[in-house]
Image (spheres, helix red, strand yellow):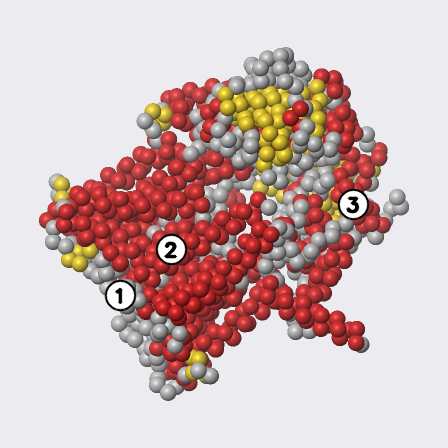
Amino acid sequence: MAPSAEVLTVRGLSKSFPGVRALDGVDLALHAGEVHALIGENGAGKSTLIKVLTGVYRPDAGDITFQGRPVSFATPLEAQHAGISTIYQEVNLIPLLSVARNLFLGREPRNRFGLLDFGRMHREAEESLRAYGVRVDVRQPLRTLGVGAQQMVALARAVATDARVVIMDEPTSSLEPREVETLFEVIRRLRADGIAVIYVSHRLDELYAMCDTVTVLRDGCRVHTGPLAELDRLTLVSTMLGRDLGEVRSEGLTKFTGDHHAADSVPVLSARDLTVPHKLHGVSLDIRPGEVVGLGGLLGSGRTETAKAISGALASKAASVTVAGVPLRAGSTPAAIRAGISLLPEDRKSEGIVPGLSVRENIALAALPRLSRFGLVSEAQVDKIVDTFVKRLRIKASSPYQKVGELSGGNQQKVLLARWLAMNPKVLLLDEPTRGIDVGAKAEVQKLVDELAEDGLGVLLISSDLEELIEGSDRVVVLKDGAVVGELTGDDVTEDKLMQTIAAGSPAPGAAGEVTRHG
Amino acid sequence: MAEAAIRPAALDRARVLQWMQTYGVYAGVAVLLVVNIAVTPHFLSAENFRTQAVQVAPVIIVALGMALAIGTEGIDLSVGAVMALAASVTALYLGYGLVPALLTVAVFAAVVGLANGALVAWVGVQPIVATLALMVGGRGIALVLLPQLKDLHNPALASLGSGDVLGIPYLIVIAAALALLVAFVIRRTTFGRQLLAIGDNRAAAKLAGLPVRRVLMLVYVACALLAAVAGVLATARLQASDPTSLGNLMELSAITAVVVGGTPLSGGRVNIAGTVAGAVLIQLLTATLIKHDLPPSWTQIAQAIVIVLAVYAARGRGKR
Amino acid sequence: MTATRTETEETVARTEKELLDAAEPVGSSRSERLSALVQQHGALAVLVIVSAVASLSFDSFATGDNLSNMATSSAFLAVVALGMTFVIITGGIDLSVGSLFALGGVLAAWGSQYGTLVALLLPMAVCGLIGVVNGLLIARSRLAPFIVTLAAMLGARGLMLSLTDEGANTYLVAKGSFLAELGQGTTLGLGNPVWITLALFVAGAVVLRRSRFGQHVYAVGGNEDAAALMGAPVARTKIIVYTLSGVLAGLAGALNAAWLASGVTILGNGMELEAISAVVIGGTLLTGGLGYVSGSLVGVLLLKVIQNVINQIGSLDSSYQQVVSGAFLAVVVIAQTWLGRRRQLL
């Protein structure tokens, strides 16, 4: 790699929000034709840095130099015009507008009357998308496309605007492997064209496959910058986590202790033929008391949908769910909860916490009918439950009356766990229980899951963190395209096997029911 | 508590706005009272206070229901139409006696509330649109039932409108009792907690197994019933049923009272004391302008400014 | 050269077609396509059916006089609905238009003593200014559109009343003035306001479909955050839209005053509801991001035809109009919500 000109230089960048110092004197240097990995735990400051670079936020302190000139972007539009384009993690386009209009928004070709030239727009849109392996009718609304194709449209849009720097924020999180390959192809082309790429991802394989340089952020500070090839994976992870290398080696990356003893008991939860149009095709699985069943698979393979269908949050056709042998009314969350199923949803902020209510009210929320008489809430009983769980889960709040919205992610997650444990559940469905919470809280939650399983709960664990999934689960049911494609048990519960199963498995809805053992 | 420790002093402006939102309404009432006592002749008299209170009572009652709807991140634009409907139905059924007439009013109001609630909770229409349909249609139905003003001569109804207990008019007693009841429901009942949770985060409430639809239905029924009570009381005070103009712009006054009283439009919080104070504030503002011979049009402009100030103060807070 | 020309011709042909269905969501499946069709053209179908039934049932319906009267009385609401269409596509709402309509009428009648230009420009300027304030509060201070415009509704009515001695004073438009001619005269058998309205709708359709601003309007309503990240000037778009709504409401009021030859103060009550109903009935999504100017025109006509039919049935009180409007609105909104939900599943 020949040293080339710095396209973008960042010095001493700082940005604070009420209560948080999101960026603390961060430096970053980006060269033309370089793919620069930007990594860090959730909350390390990656997204804040990106938002400052693209003009969404104004920095509190520090300078940005772009192509030799100091810049200060007030809006994303200014950044885009200057030559910094961004592809966000979730597709950030407009679903109701046509594909072509999305591609050209803000730079539509116009005819000599100043009116939009749709003919040219559609032609050019088709051409430019073909290069990304997307062949669609560009007049269709964007939302009729699959997520991967939408991501490609976003990419085409970003690159088409004569960008000198392209920022990709977890661009592969919703892509199929084939699409990831196409994306890499595009990135290689960008690199050859002398465009600098900032690549944010949690997937180590991708980083090592694509990136030249790496910058690691932790708690808003830059802790390392250097060629990626000089850093082995374990060192990278330990730098990111801020943990000692030896510690990581000896303990693994999670707090799970390992096997529980479910043996041959009768399943506490038994789901058959969960079917949700376009999402699930006859998924079946059993969970025995005291067992942690992992749900493996890529994003979009139907993991979240499986959990939601079991808990009645998604209406499922032709399904039967039984809890301890008793059949459940389909599509009813209250019925599932009464039967002892508790779902910790993936999206804590939008589906979990009630931010304006207190810790106390959040914990008691689901259990309210049990804590009330004649519709009046018994404050004494609420206090008792809240006390118990705040202590047991070590929830850190200034008082039970503090608003949950003011707590850290980890404590919010604990409040949600407390809400469900207060229901004395038989089955816990945990959808990404440790996503976006700090390392300490993560370990605590993992330990708690172990304890709960030992107490005889059936646990369904969904996690994109492979280590967590492998180390936490006794058994892993693997999903692909909304169907069960395999199951790992015993010594087969390893990352390698999991990857193999995902790679090899083809959805076979007819056989899906056979995969789980009976008895 | 913890907030003060975390937040830097730079956020003073935010804190002023927050103070404004929580206590601004009481400060406003106090200022208007003091100013009026100082400069307005004959302001400080029992008679005047009685008049003001009787005038504001229906607004308070409607605003209580509106506060519940807004607490669920909803709104009910049909309250004025429900008042008109209540007036029409009262006039039509008064011949059978006051109690049967009131029961019939309650049935009509409950049906309107159920329709609103069904649109919001089951069909999933935005509250502002769902209740818009009945805002338009409800007054139409009221006018179809009773095309013009009708004088009512019923002693029972008349005494409801102008009678008193221990010198306090029924209107005020009823408004106060209802305010206490609604405040109690919000604070102490399961329904109240569920209502706030639904308003704050509907998706989370649903996944926590709360009976979201039932609560929403009940909220819109309660809102319509409260509006009907206000309609009956206003009719009783007028001793005439006036479906053409009764309750016109009432949705506006009620929303103003709720918002000025510190209940955020984004739901999840309901401030009943503030709502009552908000209604009183607007009443005092109107009275002040009228007593100083300023034209009614000024009242509207003043009210518009107060609304904007109130939502401005509440800006971005409810969302946290 | 020939090749270029055919290509241009082809482009023209294609873009003409685009003008018709550019925003139509062409679905991947038949049901999606069907629901899009119902969404866009449902109101037109109902209008045709109702009109057909009405002309068969009432001899006095399909007469030239009745139709021309209906067209003129629809014109004012249509102009207001045009502005409302833009607002609703951005995902907002403007409740102040009824008051602005009344204010515009009063200002036009008052201003007519200083000439037609003043009579037309003054209402547009004042109402536009109130629109700017609405837009600033909504776009910059991020206040909820309905509450801001509700306040503006109150404020504008207050302003109008204080201009007319609390409604006691009615300004008249001088007979024989150009303004009166503009409002009351006819061209080719149709009232001048009708022609003005049609011209405004054509301009509105071109702006919405074929200008960058129009793209921004759709983008802001479709996904505001994404629009901002894609570089659409979100705040500016919103401010323009509310300003436009104010200007058009003021203009509609002015035209109405010219037609009535006076600035009637009691007009415009509830007009915001009629305008919203018309826009929504015409297939514009209340949640924003999708809508048609032509649909709003159809929606207005549909409301007016129903009103006319109710008047034709002599025994029915005019308050039935409100009941029917309300019921209609409810049906359309329920249908929209269901169609929308179906689409989410696809």
Q: Amino acid at mark 3?
A: Thr
Residue A381 appears in view: yes
- In the image, residue A126 above or below residue A51: below
**Quick one: B149 or B179, which is closer to the camera?**
B149
**In what element is the residue under mark 3?**
helix
Residue carrying label 2: C327
How many numbered discs? 3
Q: Residue furthest left?
A: B155
Q: Residue at x 34, y 62 (%)?
A: C321
The chain to which mark 3 is attached is: A
Q: CA distance from mark 2 to mark 1?
A: 20 Å
- The amino acid type of the residue labelled 2 equals Ala
In the rendered image, the vertical position of residue A428 relative to residue B77, given as above or below: above
Q: Residue at x 65, y 34 (%)?
A: A482
Q: Which mark, by number, is residue A182?
A: 3
- Residue A128: x and y in percent read 76, 56
Secondary structure state at the residue bearing disc 2: helix
Q: Position of residue C252 (x, y in %)?
A: 43, 72
Drawn side of residue A319 relative to residue B33, left or right: right
Q: What residue type is disc 1 on?
A: Ser
> In 3D space, how far apart are the residues under numbered discs 2 and 3 (Cα atoms)?
52 Å
Which residue lies under the disc numbered 1?
Answer: C315
In the image, what residue occupies the spot 89% across and 46% down?
Answer: A2
Q: Are marks 2 and 1 in contact (CB under 8 Å)?
A: no
| A388 over C18 or under it: above or below | above
Image coordinates of residue A84 in percent, x first then y, are 72, 52
Quarter where residue B299 is shown: bottom left
